[in-house]
Image: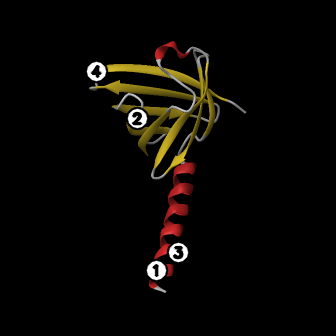
Amino acid sequence: MANRFCLQICIAALVALSSASASAAPLGHWARGDGNAKVRIEPCGPSLCAINTWIRDRSKGENVGDKLVMSVKPAGNGRLEGTAFDPQRDRSYGISITYSNDHMSTQGCLLKVLCKTVTWTRIP
């Protein structure tokens, strides 16, 4: 009986976390501004994952199915901040995401010095 109650509490907590993440996150399908990639952003545990769904030029080491795990928190005005982990390269980055309904900008920084900004457009 106690195990069942614990399971119900855990399920309720996961549902609450998922809906909180969904309301404060740019979930869905996005196309990168340079036309080289498309990703799907979805909840994955307490984090968000950006999963490559299409890559035009694979010469830079990007492949379909590659995942970026983002541990971010709302920073106000359609902005999320935190860290991102790239398991394919075993690297962590600082990340800032600014988004609206149809547009998103991501800035990833290595050592808070080497930064790159990428623009995205929502795919309907």
Residues packed near mark 3 inside 10 Å, few (<14), some (14 to 19) or many (20 plus): few
Q: CA distance from mark 4 to mark 3?
A: 45 Å
Q: Earlier in the sequence, mark 3 or mark 2?
A: 3
**Mark 4, residues whose alpha carbon is within 10 Å: few (<14), some, or many (≥20)?**
few
**How far apart, in angstroms, are the residues tagged by discs 3 and 2?**
32 Å
- Mark 1, residue position: 3
Mark-to-mark CA distance, 4 and 1: 48 Å
SS for dot 3 = helix
Residue 45 screen position, x and y as percent: 47, 52
Q: Is residue 91 above or below residue 36?
A: below
Question: Mark 4 or mark 1, which has the lower sequence index?
Answer: 1
- In the image, what residue occupies the spot 46% across and 80% down? 3
Are the residues flagged by discs 2 and 4 in contact, CB closer than 8 Å?
no
| Residue underneath mark 2 | 87
Label 2 to label 4, Cα distance in Å?
Answer: 21 Å
Q: Nearer the viewer, mark 2 or mark 4?
A: 2
Q: Label 3 amino acid? A: Gln
Residue designated by label 4: 113
* Residue at x 58% of width, y 28% of height: 64
Mark 1 or mark 3: which is in front? Answer: 1
Vertical order, 82 against 31 (above or below):
below
Residue 102 place in picture, x, y as percent: 64, 31
Tell me which numbered mark, 4 or 3, is placed earlier along the sequence: 3
- Of circles 4 and 3, the one toward us is 3
What is the total number of numbered labels drawn onto the structure image?
4
Residue type at the position of mark 1: Asn
At horizontal 54% and vertical 22% (from top left) the residue drawn is 119
Amino acid found under the numbered disc labelled 4: Val
Q: Are marks 4 and 1 in contact (CB under 8 Å)?
A: no
Secondary structure beneath dot 1 equals helix
Residue 78 falls left or right of residue 90: right
Q: CA distance from mark 1 to mark 3?
A: 9 Å
